[in-house]
Image (cartoon, grey):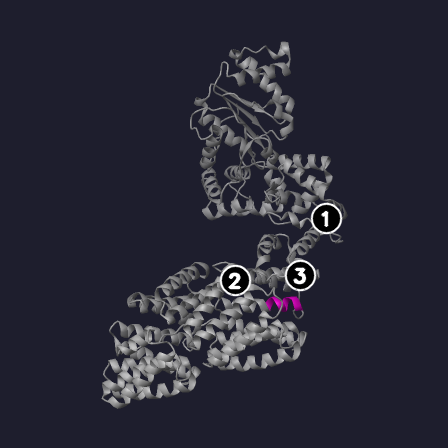
Amino acid sequence: MPPKNKNFTGREELLTRLRSAITGGGGDQVTAVVPHALHGLGGVGKTQLAVEYTYRYRSEYDLVWWIPAEQPGLARSTLAQLALEAPDLDVPDPATRGVEEAADRVLNALRRGEPYDRWLLIFDNADEPEEINDILPRGGPGHVLVTSRNHRWDSVVETLPVDVFSREESVAFLLKRVRRGLTGRDADRLAEALGDLPLALEQAGALQAETGMSAEEYLRLLEEHTGQVLDEGKPSEYPLSMTAAWTLSVSNLRQRRPEAMELLRCCAFFGPEPIPRQVFARTDDPAVRPELRALLNTPLGLSKAISELGRYALVRIDEGRNIQVHRLIQALLREESPDEQRALIRAEVHALLAAFAPKDPFNAENWPRYSELLAHVLPSRALESDVPKVRAFVLDALSYLSSSGSYRSANRYVDTVIRTWTRDNTGPPDLDVLRARSVQGNLRREMGQYEDAYQLDVSTLEQLHATVGPEHEYTLTLQNSIGADLRARGDFVEAREHDERSLDLHRQVLGADNLRTLRAMNSLALDYALTSHYPRSRELQEEAFERLLGLDPDIPPVTRVVFWNGLARSVRLCGDYVSAGDVGTDVYSFARQMGTDHPWALRAARDLAIARLRAGEVDDALELAEDVHGRCVRQFGLDNPDTLASAVNLSNVMRTMGRPQDALTLVRDTMDRYQRMYGERHPFFHGCAANVAVLHRVLGDPEAARRVNERALAGLEAKLGRDHHYSLTVAVNLTTDLATLGELESAARLGRGTLRRLRAVLGPDHPTTLASAANLSVNLLAYGLKDEAESLHADTLDRYARTLTTEHRDAEVFLEGRHLDCDFDPPSI
């Protein structure tokens, strides 16, 4: 029997599952034998788990026998030895009747349960199922446990896979093994480098405990001299070091299946995550070595090679036949390869990755494949390739991250791409770098880094003009980004003027129905909305969306949602809340196909919540607003444009639901964050401040509301002018502050001017105009101007009846003679 494992750590759950599987859920009861196998990579602790099982449950068995099964002959001989060690079996001595007969008689006695009716046999390291399958007892009152690196036991007996440690288990193991000089962070870094492999962790821990080597030094040596480091610190109970064990397996594979060896060598230059089986497709690419190309072009031979890798436990093969090689095996294989061969294999891997990548990274159907491939881009050092198709693949992977909404990952990725591609380049950036910088600007803006995005995009645009000219497709695309930057900075008029010119140029160069032209039109529609020209915005949104639907039916879903949601928003801004809710419901339903946490799904949900609130569907609006805000906080953090916008929306719903204090707490914090992110001159900061003012008045402090509204109005007028929806919204609320404070003359004077301007800017029937008229009629009546008040009241009632209807919440407040509050919701830019 092997010695008890002193370092059995973190396997309690697995041990419990093993016990349940062996006993059929019968607890301590020994049931009829069904062989079970533990299988996994060398060094994951299969044997240690089997040893622990025997010690834990030794008392439940009359007989326990350990059988080394690496060699079939030795397995039979050890089984026959039971004739000597357990004379009660009444089996002849193998020396007199031979090993074969003695082994058979032992098996027969065990099956009969005479004299032992509770027994356990462990076949350790049985790597060839077909070679010992005939000596595995089936039937009888005992249990059989096999340990093996070969996954083919799946088709022979019941199996339980043994994986590497979880990261928590690895850290706990190392901290226990190395009691001095190792921090939790050091243990985590070691576990990452060693792939959480128990044997590697034990060897590393032993070496550090014995030598006092620092984690930093160990990691450096592991990277530079993998094989040498993994040869040290071998535990006494393990027959070989990791290096020796894997070297033996690789040597056997090289002799038995040289073509499988070439496949394994190729896999060593991918990342340590699963490699999609389809990557190894037929190819005539000269970048793929002839010996591997021949294997890939022979499907049957490829399948056999993959099976052979699994047989030697050099790879893990999942149900989809995807291949995963442990990072330490990869490191050993790379280390033994000459420099020239490494370069060839890396180029080979890059070619295979690029060939397998879908051609449209914007299509959500392709995102799962890009997700699989992304794990191999950096580890394979694809960024170091200057082959055009490989660089195109790198940029497509970036486009996937951006379009799927993984902004943080995309931001880290693009920084690495640009840094790598410009590291040794002292001249002007090439076109690939400029394309990457264009995406980088978009990502900066999505994350709220507006000034950085603007400066980067302006610089990149200048270089694109100098490199490929103003009419190149990349230059035209960046023109749209400049418009978005201007919107993000709050320069709404400048953005509209820029995008007018941009749309004209797009139409001249690309035509009216090109997707890039339609994106420019969509951008201009946003500009018109942000400058209070809502009908014109709606016209452009409708035209852009209709033209979009007339293009290729396989338009990327993100693009469809951007256009469609823009249409729903423009309908709402025009005051048609019911239609906006109907369109918004369809948009959100479609957008959720990209994932409920996709940024554009969240934006569609936020706009839908606003439409429902405006339409009076308050309960639905609250449920949606709370969900969106929670998702944004989890996905993006608190200081993010989408999170801040969702917080503003939620606070507006809370106020409407009669929770003003909760609303004030949330929106006051949001206003402070807007100030830090956008600055005090940005319209969104002042709009958010106006919401704070409303809540001050609702909570009984009209003087505080007045002060905040006066500052907000001054800031908005300085940035946007008085004849802007945002400015006029604040003016409407300020008239209520004045009236509440008893300054009825000032309230009437400001109310008349505001109503006149709103009728000119938004039209006489817009809900904000009606709110202004409703409030003015209340203030005029209080001021004693009965005739003017009644005339305005009658006209406003007639307009409510023809538009929102008298059942709408706004109309009900108006008919009750109370003031209406107007609030602000920041739009997507």
Relative placement, left or right, of 735 versus 82 is left
Q: Position of residue 72 (x, y in %)?
A: 64, 24
Query: Would you name the residue on which mark 1 appears?
Result: 341
Relative placement, left or right, of 96 versus 620 is right
* SS for dot 2: helix
Q: CA distance from mark 3 to mark 1?
A: 21 Å
* SS for dot 1: helix
Residue 391 got which mark? 3
Q: Position of residue 119 (x, y in %)?
A: 49, 21
Q: Categorize mark 3 by other alpha carbons within 10 Å: few (<14), some (14-19), many (20+).
A: many
Query: Would you name the residue on which mark 2 appears?
Result: 407
Q: Is residue 168 visible?
A: yes
Q: Categorize mark 1 by other alpha carbons within 10 Å: few (<14), some (14-19), many (20+).
A: few
Q: Earlier in the sequence, mark 1 or mark 2?
A: 1
Q: CA distance from mark 3 to mark 2?
A: 20 Å
Most common secondary structure along the magenta stretch = helix
Instruction: State which region is magenta.
Output: 431-437
Residue 351 got which mark? none
Q: Earlier in the sequence, mark 3 or mark 2?
A: 3
Q: Amino acid at mark 1?
A: Gln
Q: Residue drawn 43% across and 67% down?
A: 608
Q: Amino acid at mark 3?
A: Arg
Q: Are marks 1 and 2 in contact (CB under 8 Å)?
A: no
Relative placement, left or right, of 694 versus 156 is left
Q: Is residue 477 above or below residue 226?
A: below
Q: Is residue 464 above or below residue 306?
A: below
Q: Categorize mark 2 by other alpha carbons within 10 Å: few (<14), some (14-19), many (20+).
A: many
Q: Quadrant of residue 460?
A: bottom right
Q: Residue drawn 73% across and 41% down?
A: 259
